Amino acid sequence: MDESYFKGRGAQIKTQNRFLKAHYVTDHIEGLDEPLLESPTTQIFFETPKKIVNKVDSPDLSMMYSMNPYQGCEHGCIYCYARNTHEYYGFSAGLDFESKIIIKKNAAKLLEQHLLNKNWNAVPIMLSGNTDCYQPQEKKFEITRNLLKVFVNYRHPVGMITKNSLILRDIDLLKDLASDNLVHVYISITTLDEDLRRILEPRTASSIKRLKTIEALAKAGVPVGVMNAPIIPGLNHHEIAHVLKAAADHGALACGMTVVRLNGSIRKIFEDWLRKNFPDRFDKVWNQICSFHGGNVNDSQFGRRMSGEGNIADAIHQLYRASKKKYFSDKKLPVYDLTKFRKGGNLSLF
């Protein structure tokens, strides 16, 4: 691997921000005395938003509401669709996304205000719809834990998805919610190949830790599923059956999947990463991703963007359906109990 490769980071470049008029360039690299780009250290920024719960209108997603206590994510997953949102803050979707982390310290208070609204009726809220709510900074700031305390206090349903075993820190709150059928947890497992995982998702928990997290949650009575996503042809598509079997063997009750799509700046970030890590199969992987999305890697068409189309996509979905039938036909997550919600209760935690 090239000595200039930034180990421990997913993106290897700092992409241009479409919202900024000025940006750094290296058009005349021979005139620079030192490298313009270095592997960045993590920087923390604080935001004080006016609301934390967001309505999701996409027909591709079953969740109606989501919330994100963090913007940006140190996990550094190279394919992450959330990278583009970092540009709204004036940052790059590349290295900035995984090194400049924005913390929403008032998230729990905002959630409580939302639940106290007299017009709000209990609907599951997803933690998180964008960046991972158990990314490394959560260990220090405990914003997700404080959000869970609000859900517990008001007996409100919540869905969660994460790659991080840090979720087990909050197993006391999750067990409390599970006792009233108020929580579903999904653990995301993209690959069981640790060599691939280290460069694809450099700061995430290992696949073994994620499987043990599924096992620990299941043993505690917390309903848990596995999300095998994204499926990247030529890199991890052949692992679908192995991932689903391993998750089911460890106690997962449900499964899901999506295919990779490289929207916005992610196209350039992923292309650079793929050329540097898999030059021998770049053309094969790139062309197969294009085949998913009508000849492009950037796809915004509802229905197709997350599932793909064409012969390769069909083969992947057939393998997924067969694996789901084999390992999950007798399993399912319990239905949320929306009747437990303490609507407008005088139960403030703040």
Image (cartoon, rainbow, N blue to C red):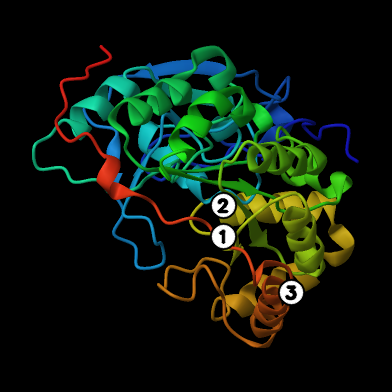
Q: Let me know if residue 283 appears in the view.
A: no
- Indicate which disc, 2 or 3, sits on the residue closer to the N terminus: 2
Choose mark 2 or mark 3, whichever is in front.
Answer: 3
Please name the residue shown 49% across and 76% down the image.
304
Q: Looking at this view, name the residue that lies furthest to the bottom.
A: 311
Please name the amino acid that badge 3 sits on: Lys
**Tag 1: Cα neighbours inside 10 Å, few (<14), some, or many (≥20)?**
many
Q: Let me know if residue 294 appears in the view.
A: yes
Q: Which residue is mark 3?
A: 326
- Indicate which disc, 3 or 1, sits on the residue closer to the N terminus: 1
Distance (Cα) linking label 3 and label 1:
31 Å
Distance (Cα) linking label 1 and label 2:
5 Å
Secondary structure of residue under mark 3? helix
Describe residue 93's horizontal placement relative to residue 54 as left or right.
right
Residue 109: name its quadrant: top left
Please name the amino acid that badge 1 sits on: Leu
Please name the residue shown 48% across and 39% down the image.
178
Q: Which residue is mark 2?
A: 266
Please name the residue shown 82% across and 41% down the image.
208
Q: Position of residue 155 (x, y in %)?
A: 32, 34
Describe residue 20's horizontal placement relative to residue 110 as left or right.
right
The answer to whether the residue labelled 1 contacts the one labelled 2, judged by CB atoms less than 8 Å apart, is: yes
Q: Which mark is residue 315?
A: none
Q: Which residue is mark 1?
A: 262
Q: Position of residue 183 (x, y in %)?
A: 45, 43
Residue 120: name its quadrant: top left
Secondary structure of residue under mark 2? helix
